[in-house]
Amino acid sequence: MKLVDCVVKKKGFHVADKLPEFDLEKYLPYRFTVVAARLSDDLAKKYKKRYGISIPEWRVLLNVGYTQNLSVRDIEKRVNLEKSKVSRTAAKLEAKGFLIKQIDGDDRRLVKFTLTPEGIRLLGELIPIAQAFQAEIKEKLGDQIGLVNQTLDLLMKEDE
């Protein structure tokens, strides 16, 4: 294994050390994270100022609107947010009048969400923005879009 020099700051001193050679810029998990963050930020620029919602609020709204009977746990898994962040985000959306929180009749520990008429109206205005953004991405990818979708499907497939 090839080692590379690494400078580590310890208690105010720089200490040279050795690490295995590693190309972070070609490391796929890193690259996917960077691309996902950029796409999310770019989309947020299109709706945040006008509608006053954050990226987590967008994700929760979208999932509640298009998936039935979601609990905090379900949303946490789907949007990759910590349970506490989902709860805080849902509380903000509820305070803004976009969500209704309901206690599950079978398990009182579970809280489920539905959109209010105002939440449906808001999502109805946000979806065309998201669709236009997706069209921009597809145009940029051109003929590669099919391969990109196949690759994402493969990577998103849960282990069986």
Image (cartoon, grey):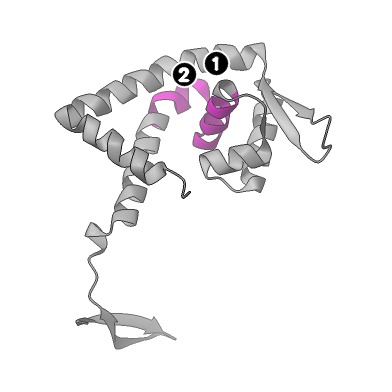
Q: In the rendered view, would you say 127 is above or below 79?
A: above
Q: Which residue does the image show at 83% across and 33% down from the upper left?
A: 106
Q: Position of residue 24 (x, y in %)?
A: 26, 63
SS for dot 2:
helix
Q: Nearer the viewer, residue 142 or 123?
A: 142
Residue 118 is left or right of residue 25, and the answer is right
Q: Amino acid at mark 1?
A: Leu
Q: Which residue is mark 1?
A: 122
- Where is 30 relative to 135, above or below? below
**Would you identify the image quadrant in which residue 117 lies?**
top right
- Picture layout, residue 91 above or below residue 127: below
Residue 58 falls within the magenta-colored stretch: yes
Circle on res. 126: 2
Horizontal placement of 137 versus 104: left or right?
left
Left or right: residue 59 versus residue 1 is: right
Q: Residues within 10 Å of mark 2 (few under 14, many from 20)?
A: some
Residue 138 appears in the picture as rendered = yes
Could you tell me which secondary element the residue under label 1 belongs to? Answer: helix
Residue drawn at x 59%, y 14% as measured from the top left: 120
Instruction: Name the kind of residue labelled 2 in the image.
Output: Leu
Give percent across and percent down for residue 17.
29, 87
In the picture provided, is 27 more to the left or to the right than 63? left
CA distance for labels 2 and 1: 6 Å
The correct choice, above or below, for 17 with respect to 20 in the image is below
Asked whether residue 38 is in view, the answer is no
Please report the bounds of the magenta region as a residue range.
45-64
Residue 156, by quadrant, is top left
Q: Position of residue 15 (x, y in %)?
A: 32, 88
Instruction: Tell how many labels.
Output: 2
